[in-house]
């Protein structure tokens, strides 16, 4: 069998095709590089927006888009959803107790749930609020507030009937001479109250961590990121109290401390991040500190010191310390 005859003409044609293929390959590589550079530039310019291009990649300071059990960010997102529902529930209850109608209760529920994150984004981070693109938070909070307005009176009636039933049993025991804890006769804190306090504390923890994460993503100093965490978890309630004409809870000692556990949780997260701990340990340690300090505050009725004041009888225009 004879080998194929190679002519100069064939060699020239082969060389031309090879050069053409290399040229196309180089053009494709250059186009791909240009596209990548453009995407990275847009991502850098848009890095302060909530919905930055996904080509940036997501580090541990970002949440998963929806709840899941595959990552710490996915679990945190689930806790975030739970906190949103709980805050909306409490906001609607307080609004209804303050005399607002169903529309007002629904709006206050939404404000309580997303108000802290809104103030964080608009004031501290100078960007559009997160719920303008993650609209499920609006739907969750409004629907929760609306349903709470109509269903919670039934829950209150059930709680009152249960309280009276337990009180009657305790009275019978006392009359019968059986020893009992007399302090529990006038105190009624049932499983529902405990569940609501627990869910509220979990939401407080999740919001504090997410607020701190947003500060980190925006390149803020540690102290600003910590304030972002506290604001995210408490400024919705602050706005709720102002709208309902109530003393603002986080700055009055008519209830146990609330903002301080949130701030402690945010600082713990940032400290753990500074120590280069894993995302799971960062989130877990922050939840432990915030949740634990909140439970201790409720259990021991921890309040900050305030002045003892008397009526303004001297014409000073203010109440003065005794």
Image (tube, helix red, strand yellow):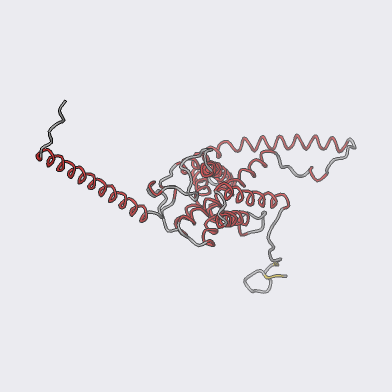
Viewer-closest of 306 and 200: 200
Q: Is residue 43 left or right of residue 190?
A: left
**Spot occupied by residue 91 in the image (x, y as percentages of width and height):** 56, 46
Residue 277 in percent (x, y) is at 57, 52
Frontmost residue, 111 versus 223 = 223
Total numbered labels placed on residues in the image? 0
Q: Quadrant of the C terminus?
A: bottom right
Q: Quadrant of residue 164?
A: top right
**Looking at the image, is 190 positioned above or below residue 245?**
above
- Position of 78 with respect to 198 (left or right) is left
Residue 105 % position (x, y):
52, 45
Q: Is residue 53 left or right of residue 6?
A: right
Q: Nearer the viewer, residue 78 or 85?
A: 78
Question: In the current view of this chain or complex, which residue is farthest to the front?
Answer: 1
Residue 318: name its quadrant: bottom right
Is there any visible trace of residue 101 in the rendered image?
Answer: no
């Amino acid at each position: 069998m004879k080998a194929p005859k190679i002519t100069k003409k064939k060699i020239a044609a082969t060389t031309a095709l090879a050069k053409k293929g290399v040229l196309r390959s180089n053009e494709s590589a250059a186009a791909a590089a240009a596209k990548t550079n453009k995407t990275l530039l847009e991502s850098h310019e848009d890095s302060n927006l909530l919905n930055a291009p996904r080509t940036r990649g997501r580090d541990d300071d970002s949440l998963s888009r929806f709840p899941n059990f595959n990552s710490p960010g996915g679990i945190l997102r689930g806790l975030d959803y739970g906190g949103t529902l709980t805050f909306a529930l409490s906001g609607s209850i307080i609004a209804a107790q303050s005399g607002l109608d169903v529309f007002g209760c629904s709006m206050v529920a939404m404000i309580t749930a997303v108000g802290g994150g809104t103030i964080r984004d608009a004031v501290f981070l100078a960007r559009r609020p997160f719920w303008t693109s993650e609209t499920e938070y609006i739907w969750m909070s409004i629907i929760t507030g609306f349903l709470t307005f109509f269903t919670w009176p039934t829950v209150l009636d059930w709680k009152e009937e249960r309280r009276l039933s337990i009180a009657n049993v305790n009275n019978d025991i006392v009359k019968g001479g059986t020893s009992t804890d007399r302090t529990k006769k006038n105190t009624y804190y049932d499983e529902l109250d405990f569940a609501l306090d627990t869910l509220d504390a979990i939401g407080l923890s999740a919001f504090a961590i997410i607020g701190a994460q947003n500060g980190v993503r925006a390149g803020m100093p540690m102290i600003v990121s910590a304030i972002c965490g506290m604001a995210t978890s408490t400024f919705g309630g602050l706005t709720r109290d102002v709208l309902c004409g109530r003393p603002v809870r986080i700055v009055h000692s008519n209830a146990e401390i609330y903002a301080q556990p949130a701030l402690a949780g945010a600082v713990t997260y940032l400290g753990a991040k500074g120590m280069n701990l894993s995302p799971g340990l960062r989130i877990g340690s922050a939840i432990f500190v915030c949740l634990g300090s909140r439970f201790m505050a409720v259990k021991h009725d921890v309040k900050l010191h305030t002045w003892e004041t008397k009526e303004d009888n001297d014409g000073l225009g203010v109440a003065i310390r005794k």
